[in-house]
Amino acid sequence: MPQMKSQSKNDKNTITRRTAILGLGGLGVFGALAGRLYQLQVLQAEDYRALSDDNRFNFNMLLPARGEIRDRFGVTLAKNSQNYRVIVIPERASELEKTLDDVSKISSLSESQRERIRKDVKQNPKFVPILVKDNVDWETFSALNIRLHALPGIVSEVGQGRSYPKSGVFSHVLGYIGRAGARDIANDDDPLLRQPTFRIGKTGIEASQEETLRGASGRLKVEVNARGRIVREWPDPETRATPGKDVWLTLDAELQDFAAAQFATEDEGDDSGGICVIDVITGELRTLLSMPTFDANLFVSGLTQSDMDSMNTDPKRPQYNKVVAGGYPPASTFKMAVMLAALESGMINTKGKVFCTGKTELGNRIFHCWKRDGHGLVDMRDALKVSCDSYFYEVSQVIGIDVIANVARRLGLGQSYDISIGGGISGIVPDEAWKLNRFGTGWRTGDTLNASIGQGFVLATPIQLAVMTARIANTIEAVNPNLVIGENLPAFEPLDFDPVHLAFVQDAMWSVTSEIGGTAYRQFPFGTDPEFRGTEMAGKTGTGQVRGISASERASGIRRNEKLPWKLRDHSIFVGYAPFDRPRFAVGTLVEHGGSGAKRAADISRAVLGEALRRDKLGGSEAGALK
Amino acid sequence: MLTSHSSFQGSRNVSGSSLKSKLFEINWLLPTLVGVVGLVGVVMIFAATDGVWRYGAFQHFTRIAVGGVVMLAVALIDIRLWYRLAYPIYAVGLALLIGVEIVGVEVNGSERWLDLGVIRLQPSEIMKPAIVLALARYYHDLPGHRVSHILGLLGALILLAMPMALILRQPDLGTTLLLGTTGVAIVFLAGVSWRVIGLASLFAAVAIPLFFRFGLQPYQQERILTFMDPTRDPTGASYHIIQSKIALGSGGVHGKGFMRGTQRQGEYVPENRTDFIFTVIGEEFGLIGGLMTMGLYMAVIGVCIWLSMTCKAMFAKLLILGLTTTFALYIFINLGMVMGMAPVVGVPLPLISYGGTVILAVMGGFGLILSAHLHRGVELPRSG
């Protein structure tokens, strides 16, 4: 028993000692843990705080509002509009298909749309909103909004879209916007382009002024969780998006509208063609219109197949920007260039006369004057006034094609202008070198004769005809067209024609419109208003031979044998400027298959020129342009 | 032995029949501290679940309350009964572990759960107090001179090795290590000679590398290797540790404030309601909160050690100290893991982490400690 007692006492001492050892050990571990905590939370706290912030914050891109496009008076041509969109957040839609069925009842969804939605849902995390439909009209949008409670996962949203309030008449000029394609992204490293909802200019002003209109992205500081879901946003003014700047055009929206209205016909819809009104001093374009037009809004909201088909099969080719990209034989409007070349060559006297019998023989070929019976004896001035082809056949043989081509180029033909809308063609001013290069054959005198009346190889666009006319009217400077206000343009080069020669041409053009017997004579071209009763103009008619042949068609030698009667009619062409004594605006008009000679184009030109002068007289309205 | 029956009565003549006076005799300091730690758990789970009561905080509160009742009930049961039940409980625990082996439910790639229809049970949690009971009784019964004897050691080794092997097979490395360390601590406390300790250490130095090489699953090896070198896999295995350290470190001295932890809100630290709940404490209450939590735990452990001193019987002492060791090891492993000092082995922070079985096991353990203290005057039979 005593032995056992001592044993027990021994045990007790041992266990107490060992408890103390373990207890101290435990204390040591607590000390080590506390030390570690001190190290983490005090010594390294800053590092970990930074890491925590790295975890915590993401920067989301804020899209800038696109700049607007306005006319010279500030009328909005392209603006940002409310885009009513319907969106689904998959994680909130327990039964996606049923929800889509329900949405379909209010706003129909095609099977291809639903397929796209399903694909998007599959490819993204469940909390990413997926577009169901955009550009929903207001009625549908409100109908959906009322029923939102019964549509789990569906969210309605008002986003930024683009609309073109003047729908048609500026479509060719403005172009349209769309999602950036692979090539856009390759050429431009702006991360905005990778944003699925961001739109960039695809054509026209929207594309050329992209830099101005786009603006710069902002950054939204957001707190995110481990799965990328936004916990909260941190508004920070310094990272707001910079909206794009507005672009002001030299165009006059009302004049453009007015011009478009002139192309209307009684029974055949809008005539096809183009018109350009240019300021003869500044080169500012007041009207740049291709007819018929199309609604650019369709390109923003997405073209339907039927829209596409009707546009593509329309013989009047509404998508085609004829005013800058349509190459037509300028016909008799080219005669000013020949006339000026004759004067500049010094080989032709203005008093010299040609006897017009109605035809000119060259070797075994016969070249006809438009007037079968001939004009009889005509001098240079009369030749233009009555548009006698024979006179120009004779003169051109004397001076040769190279002199004519030189003058034509100095008048602005055969070159495309940089007016920021793209697609412009240079047309053709043929000469010996051109033909050798183009066809590998030598120039023939017959080619000269054809060219002298603006036929044959000669091709020009309506804007080139307007520029040519503006340069003639300006007398001093080689006016170049411009479309965007505030763009730094190189100063115009001197025109460098003898003013006396130009005055002679101007006078001859005056006779066309202001003398009895002129091909476009009107006693009061701009009506009988007291204000414009005495205003005179100068101009020239042209009647282009059949076929709307573009430069490319001619170049590639393809000649379509259109059987449509409309297609067989002549092109109606007119150029002119007014007022004659103090030139202000020049116009170039072409109506495809306008029929009845140059009358159609002359009528349109006269009306539009008159309207341009009238609007110019309103004064004060230039405030916008001064900006 | 019959006569000894009367001597079972406490020397201070505790009237065992009066429940009321027995309750009064309980050391109330320990239940109070345990309750406070439990409430810290409620608050932190509340924060970890974005302030939604029903996502855990409420359940935790209920479990602490139920656990408290269990704890007191266990405390009131006579130590002699626990002494008698020590081996049966161990046997049941072992049986349940074998049951897991056969019909266990797999969760997160390891079989730890036993579905008994009504409740889901984690037998490895029951094994923690059971092994302490068994070893305490083993050493209580073992004559002192045989403690360091080869046969005495072998008995303890067998008691310890069987459950460890079964738990390691689940596989649950954390609990295995915890069980083993607790067992070693009890052997140490029982008075094994320093010579044996020296030899065992030598053996361990050789055996542990071999065990690492052949005894661990590849994912367990990976976890330990990642722990040694966190850059091995920054998104995978060490993601836990890195994010956990960011949460703690960014908390600084004062913390980001209650419910203001951004690492927590961002759900960067996985399992922050359960094993990684200390990251929420550290992030939202900073060094101050962390040290206070550790202080609370130290107080609990200190009280337990003091209680063990008041007991006479070897069984009572070893029971208290063994259970306290388990409790302390939970804390050490968990905090070490959260702070990037120990491998990620999935050990909860006792009383604070969300999880029912652990709370019941831990609080049941405290019940045993209280029982041992309450019946400290009771003599237990001792052979030899």
Image (cartoon, coloured by chain):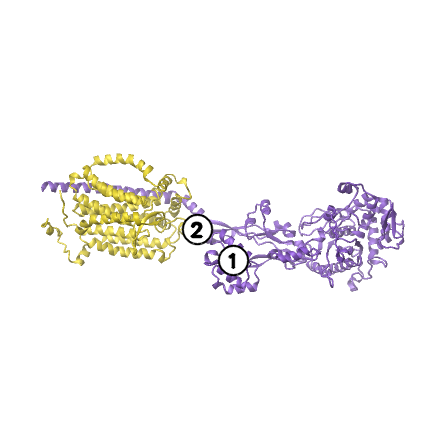
Chain colours: A purple, B yellow
Instruction: Count the labels in the image.
Output: 2
Left or right, residue A7 beside residue A143: left
Disc 1 residue crowd, few under 14, some 14–19, many 20+, Cα 10 Å: some
Q: For this rendering, which residue is in front, B189 or B99?
A: B99
Q: Position of residue B258 (x, y in %)?
A: 37, 53
If the image is split into quadrants, where does the C terminus of chain B sit? top left
Q: CA distance from mark 2 to mark 1?
A: 23 Å
The correct choice, above or below, for A42 with respect to A131 in the image is above
Asked whether, in this view, residue B186 is left or right of residue A341, the answer is left
Subunit that carries the residue with mark 1: A
Q: Are discs 2 and 1 located on one and the same chain?
A: yes
x, y percentage for residue A453? 82, 50
Of residue A114 and residue A194, the one placed in the foreground of this image is A114
Up the image or down, A580 lies above or below A20; here it is: below
Residue where numbered disc 2 is placed: A225
Residue depth check, mark 2 versus mark 1: number of the one nearer the observer: 1
Chain letter, disc 2 residue? A
Q: Is residue A26 visible?
A: no
Which residue position is annotated with label 1?
A87
First in sequence, mark 2 or 1: give its number.
1
Residue B309 in percent (x, y) is at 19, 46
Q: Amino acid at mark 1?
A: Ile
- Is residue A426 something one can see in this rendering? yes
SS at mark 1 in the image:
strand
Of the residues shown, which amino acid type is indicated by label 2? Asn
Q: Is residue A286 above or below residue B218?
A: below
The location of residue A262, given as percent across then percent down, is 73, 61
Secondary structure of residue under mark 2: loop
How packed mark 2 is, by other alpha carbons closer than 10 Å (few <14, some 14-19, many 20 or more), is many
